[in-house]
Image: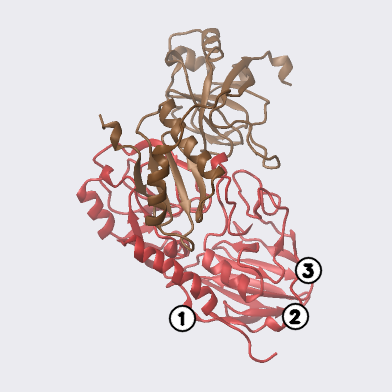
Amino acid sequence: MANTDTYPRFLPAGDSAILIQFGEKIDVQINQKAHALATFLQNNPIQGIGETIPGYCTLLVHFDLRYTSYMEIMNILRQKAPQENFLPKPDPRRIKIPVVYGGHYGPDLDFVAQHNHLTSEEVIRIHSSSVYLVYMIGFTPGFAYLGGLDESIATPRVQNPRKHVPAGSVGIAGMQTGVYPIDSPGGWQLIGHTKKILFDPHQNPPCLLAPGDEVVFIPEPVEEHQ
Amino acid sequence: MTLRVLESGFFTTIQDLGRKGYQKFGVPVSGVMDTFASSAANRLVGNLPDAAVIEISPGGATFIAEDDCLIAVTGNGFSLSIHKNQFPFWLSIFVRANDTIRISPQRNSGWAYLAVAGGVKVPIIMESSSTYIRGKFGGFEGRVLTNEDRILTGSAAPGWKQKAGSRFSHEYLPPYSESVTVRVIPGPQLESFSSAGIQTFLKSPYQIITESDRMGYRLEGPVIEHITSADIISEGMALGSIQVPANGQPIIMLSDRQTVGGYTKIATIILADTPLIAQCPIGSGLVRFQTTTLEIARQSYLERISALEMGIEETEDT
């Protein structure tokens, strides 16, 4: 186990970005540090610092070589990174996502049930009774990495990834669950589908979900999904 | 002013310098593969360097100018003919209405950039004109150009015709080649590789294989050995990141890269050298890697930017 004093670590991600690592595991508190620093940098612009990308336990900070240097940015971040106030958002938003589970909308629901020695109804009940936390957005536009999947329905990815997974598909991959915001290839076990729009390039912000949000899935009958 | 697409080629898109500030929403930067060539083309026709251009894939493309216009074509590994006459790249050219502009691939083509005075005009999505194909947004209806598409441009600055004949001096070009050595900063996951693996990476030539695209160039060569798992907890990825998955074959992350990735990254190509890798031909290009320092990297980048200004030779006669 690494001593907590060794974090944050500062790693070069090329000549114009620094990767700040707040830990090396998926953990709410570590994740909050990355988002807190991202928010701080957004609210307190520093000359030369460009966009940042929060990860599970990292923040990638881009900077513009025309205005600053790696060492200059590193010295600023070394001071700021550990000082920030890492309190969670006081009132996380809770976003409800209606889902039609199984059948045509969730072709892998039965496999997820069999794999975990459960019935399909039990998988639906377990999946829709957890509160999930948005750790980060990535992979495709608007894709939220959610934490909080009940271990009893964890399932490995499909053997042959699909070339086309429709937007709105709800899936499970290992200990993760999530919703495909756009049509894309994908290897997750598809258990259901939502009509909720998770990504719209014409809206600002373009994403329904943001880091720190809570997500709950609400089972919905097929008729209401037409 | 309008350009009509006669032969679109297989992956011709509208791009600018990319969509900045939306990666936290999972939105890739996109933008031109070779920022140097596109910026030079824009300067040659009097545009700002970040004006939208047409990026032409290694298959080439043909257009018809529906009005008089001023164009410049830049890039590596193509030839240019206008109304059946050959013209050099890196030159601003006055084109008459109904002239055909043909950009033909040569043996080792990278990407070509067609800039038009006034800039290509498409709806701005998230502050950028760049096309992101997988997301089906940006650029021309969120897709690659197809035959008979009509591309509109903005109004050119007054006196635009006088720019015709400006050229970009070849001595200021990046050393484009089908066999390049690109400089890298090691990390961020250098510690995931054995010292033998790191030596393999730095001493071996890697070929850019055909399964490469605007998202990333896949390389094939000696296997780079890990000492840890090849998977990491997903984190943000910079332009030029070199991911090495469990098979030990590197992937260079380029314009349409995902915002986050879950493979170990052995090194990142410095910004000054990203045009070199972008223009190294898919399917035949050879790449070698050489470590450098952050100081040299920054110096090289600043030199590349000043080369964009120094390289322009304004026409002397009007």
Q: Is residue A31 above or below residue B288?
A: above
Left or right: residue B268 compared with residue B173: left
Does dot 3 land on a helix, a strand or a loop?
Answer: loop
Residue B55 on image: x %, y %: 60, 62
Residue drawn at (63%, 87%) of the image? B315
Badge 3, how many Cα within 10 Å: few under 14, some, many 20+? Answer: many
Which residue position is annotated with label 2? B159
Q: Chain of mark 1?
A: B
Which of the marked residues, 3 or 1, is nearer the chain's N terminus? 3
Of circles 1 and 2, the one toward us is: 2
Q: Which color is chain A depicted in?
A: brown
Q: Measure the alpha-carbon separation of dots 3 and 2.
A: 15 Å
Which residue ends up furthest to the bottom in the rendered image?
B317
Q: What type is the residue that disc 2 sits on?
A: Gly
Q: Measure the alpha-carbon separation of dots 3 and 1.
A: 33 Å
Residue B90 on image: x %, y %: 57, 77
Which residue position is annotated with label 1? B171
Of circles 3 and 2, the one toward us is: 2
Residue drawn at (45%, 36%) of the image? A84
Which of the marked residues, 3 or 2, is nearer the chain's N terminus? 3
Q: Which color is chain B depicted in?
A: red
Q: Is residue B100 above or below residue B138?
A: below
Left or right: residue B267 compared with residue A47: left
Q: Quadrant of the N terminus of chain B?
A: bottom right
Q: What type is the residue that disc 1 sits on?
A: Glu
Residue A50 on image: x %, y %: 52, 52
Residue drawn at (54%, 45%) of the image? A44
Which of the marked residues, 1 or 2, is nearer the chain's N terminus? 2
Residue drawn at (24%, 49%) of the image? B197
Q: Is residue B213 visible?
A: yes
